[in-house]
Amino acid sequence: MSGVRGVQPDALDGFRDVQRLAYACAEAVAAQLRPGMTERDAARAMREWAVERGVRDWFHLPFAWFGDRTAFVGFKIPTQFFPTHRRLEAGMPFILDLAPIHRGFTADIGYSGCLGPNPVHDRLLADLRDHRDLILREVRERRSLQRIYEDVDRLMARQGYTNRHRAYPFGVIAHKVDRVKEHRWSPHIAGFGTQSLRGLAKDALHGHREGWSPLWSPYRMSDHPPQPGLWAVEPHLGFRGTGAKFEEILVVTEDDAFWLDDELPHVKRWQETDKGAAA
């Protein structure tokens, strides 16, 4: 397997560990969610859980979205992404999103769940599998990131869904993640860690000179082959007032690509479905 530009092979273990830590955090908090809890309650619980386990810095602080906010209904300005006093109800979907930095390694994950049975949400989660497969296949084919983005859009349309990651700043479906130097004091700006923002800005400047962008968007700045490195990828499906996504690290090498880890909740869910169908 070819090396990843700028990342030592043994460093992948560090990224894998922090990604698993982040998913463990989301699963622990999801198990605690009850009717009446607010998005702010969930975000606070994720932050406290992570800090208790040694997290001192963040790419971004935890987000939580409940109900139709999982599909970003009515979102027009960046401040609408921040946790609110929206209360969870039975049968309501939720998304927990956190991006911790631990021991200098960064992860950015999204966990979709529902408080009780919800067939529409189940269908969304199942159909995300096709997007994970498509993205990996086309990155391996070295297609333009802009073209892959468009193919994800077309797949969503065939499935009957709308693209909700387009509502994110710059419409990104993914962004690069890197190692970050650890400091005792780690300030934040609008919920994002200043160290990570500086790293992203440095990548953007470097990439501009070489003809690539650290933000995977639908625009011309992403009309280039996949850049080697680690990418946090988050296809986000919406159907009326319900949204669902996963977010995990895709490793891109000079001549290949692979998902960093298959031991993740959404992947295990699909594997269990396969086992049930085969039984």
Image: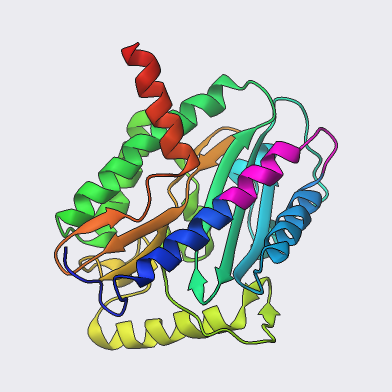
Q: Pick the quarter of the image with the N terminus.
A: bottom left
Whole-percent x, y for residue 269 in the image? 46, 31
Whole-percent x, y for residue 76 in the image? 63, 57
Q: Is residue 15 left or right of residue 33?
A: left
Please tell me how many numbered marks the rendered image carries. Answer: 0
**Is residue 51 in sight in this rendering?**
yes
Q: Is residue 200 left or right of residue 230?
A: right
Establish if 7 lies above or below 258.
below
Q: Is residue 142 left or right of residue 37?
A: left
Q: Residue at x 69, y 83 (%)?
A: 187
Identify which residue, 231 or 273, lies in the foreground.
273
Residue 83 in the magenta stretch? The answer is no
Whole-percent x, y for residue 37 in the image? 83, 41
Q: Pick the quarter of the image with the C terminus.
A: top left
Residue 28 in the magenta stretch? The answer is yes
What span is colored magenta in the figure?
Answer: 24-37
Establish if 273 lies above or below 42.
above
Q: Quadrant of residue 7?
A: bottom left
Whole-percent x, y for residue 264 in the image? 46, 44
Identify which residue, 168 or 268, lies in the foreground.
268
**Is residue 73 in sight in this rendering?**
no
